[in-house]
Image: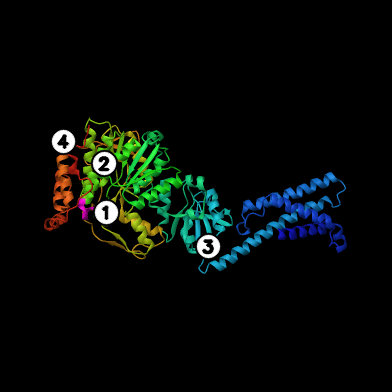
Amino acid sequence: MVMDSVLFLISIYGALCLRFNALLPTSQIFEYSWLIGMLIVLKLAIFRLRKIYRPILRYTDMEFLMAVVRAIIYSSGILVIFAYLKGNWPLPRSVLMLDGILTLVLIIGARLSIRTALTRLISAVNSAASPERFVIYGAGESGCQLARLINNDPGYEIVAFVDDNPDLENQIIQGKRVYASSYLPRLLRNKPFDTVLLAMPGLSATRKKAIITQLQSLPIIVKTIPSVKEILSKGIAINQIRQIDVADLLGREEVLPHPELLGLNVTGKSVLVTGAGGSIGSELCRQIAQLQPKSLILLELNEYSLYSIDMELREKYLINPIPYLGTVTNQAYLEKILRRHRVETIYHTAAYKHVPLVEANPGPGVYNNVVGTLKTATAAINCQVNNFVLISTDKAVRPTNIMGASKRIAELIIQALSDNQRHHTCFALVRFGNVLDSSGSVVPRFRQQIAQRQPITLTHREITRYFMSIPEAVRLVIQAGALAKGGEVFLLDMGEPIKIYDLAVQMIKLSGLVPDKDIPIEITGLRPGEKLYEELLINGDNAEPTQHSKIYCAREYKIPWQELYPMVNDLIKKAEKNDYLAIVTQINRIVPEYQNSQLLKSQLIQQKPLRNFTGTNSFSSMNGSPISG
């Protein structure tokens, strides 16, 4: 305010001198002193009312400068109107108009000068290293907003804009030229930069993938801004700029969900999620929380995982989930929960899923995945739960490892129980491939290795996997469950399989590094039970379309419960002894397509049984069929 008071005084004096075409003597200035004081007070009052003094000068932007212009127009306009109405106003009206122009020049000029000086000073103090230099890809509204944010941060510098719209080429936006994308290699040579920021949130997945592929040829880091949905809800902020996700590399076009399918088994219902703290389970909880369930019950064995998802749901989604710490192998505990909350829908995600760990710990792995599924399904039947959805995996198809085989047996159990007519529970299972960023998967491991400049370890150069983002997979799981009539095997459209070696190369390049130079890629060899490729169908191409374009229904062989039950019971007894060779032999009887490598079989023959493993509520204590009146 002090600075503005001085500038207002200079402005009025300058206007008087210009009007009378001469420097005014001191005596004449004193004649106008009362009037000059009144004008200064009026301007300060209007500036204060217009909240001109709230923003920090360092963050002066165009919006703020327009507010200053409006405040000056208001103050000068009031004075001119007052002079016209007064008639015998001591100052000529031309002085007031000149004063308005000079005030505008002085006030805006002073603020821009201060901002420039402060920015340079802070930049000089803070940046022992040079600022990170950006090229913004996208000269639309989002790109301009991003540029304004970056200009206010001395740690960043914008080099130029890039856009594919020929109408924008060579235009100047916020002092920076717009180039065609084909000019990027030359721009990198002439004006070196570190990072390209993709500022086109509405871009289709296919087009985004094409741009990312084009940028991979340059030794730069590629980052992006949030989606349109996130921008509309939160706006753009520097901390929302993120590295390119593997999901961006897949180029999958998102299919809008069917609202009636999303809500059918969830909205207004009491819903239980087992394995609620896992990658799939926690995302299920997030999406269910937004679908307004009557109650959401969380069951999780890991204390910290349960605490984390419980707190997240309370803070972000403003609901009160009901957390339970426990295992799915305790049927009595499950039935107590189901009856207490009158659960209507169960999503069963609880499982051991890491192939090497389950291969090394076959007893606990089989017990959790097979018995856990059986006891949860049996509890659902006994408590008259309406809907039960098992989350399965593509590793259950022609399995070569114990984890995949145990999930295939879990599928067979669900199919066999569904065919039994003595209950009202609608069973279904959903099978899909890898999800991005799940715990222990290749993507977060590669990301960590790249960040730490460690070699990327890969088991085989030709290995491929299906990938899907966790949110998309969960949306489809909820909708698939709503399509169920009983016993269906639903498959999710995973797109084309991705070569893991190519994925590693892309992730290295998008981090601005060179594969096999900055980050070596080491081939370690296939692990026990690991396959080169995964499949979604057991009986070939027999998937039928459903009303959802990304969900298919497979017709696969089943084993009647009377035949399956004795074999499963025998498997569980062997699992309790943790006898590897006995376990894989029994698995082969239940799942004939299950195969172990010859090397592994030769090792198993010489391996002695490990110590006994005893789980909670052993399967053998169930006294026959799980179907109770």
- Residue 18 is situated, as x and y percent measured from the top left of the image, at 81, 58
SS for callout 4: helix
Q: Cα distance, mark 2 to mark 3? A: 59 Å
Q: Earlier in the sequence, mark 1 or mark 2?
A: 2
Left or right, 48 with reference to 195: right
- Residue 562 shows which numbered tag? 4
Pick whichever, 578 or 564, lies toward us: 578
Q: Residue at x 39, y 51 (%)?
A: 308
Going by the image, does 337 lie left or right of 195? left
- Foreground mark, 2 or 4, reads 2
Disc 3 target residue: 155
Where residue 428 sits: x, y (%)? 28, 37
Q: Residue at coordinates 67% horizontally, 53% vertically from top-left?
A: 52
Q: Which mark is residue 463?
A: 1
Q: Residue at x 58, y 55 (%)?
A: 174
User: How many angstroms separate mark 2 from mark 4 (CA)?
Assistant: 24 Å
Majority SS type along the magenta span: helix
Disc 2 marks which residue?
332
Residue 151: which quarter of the image? bottom right
Kind of residue sitting beneath label 1:
Ile
Indicate which disc residue 592 carries. Answer: none
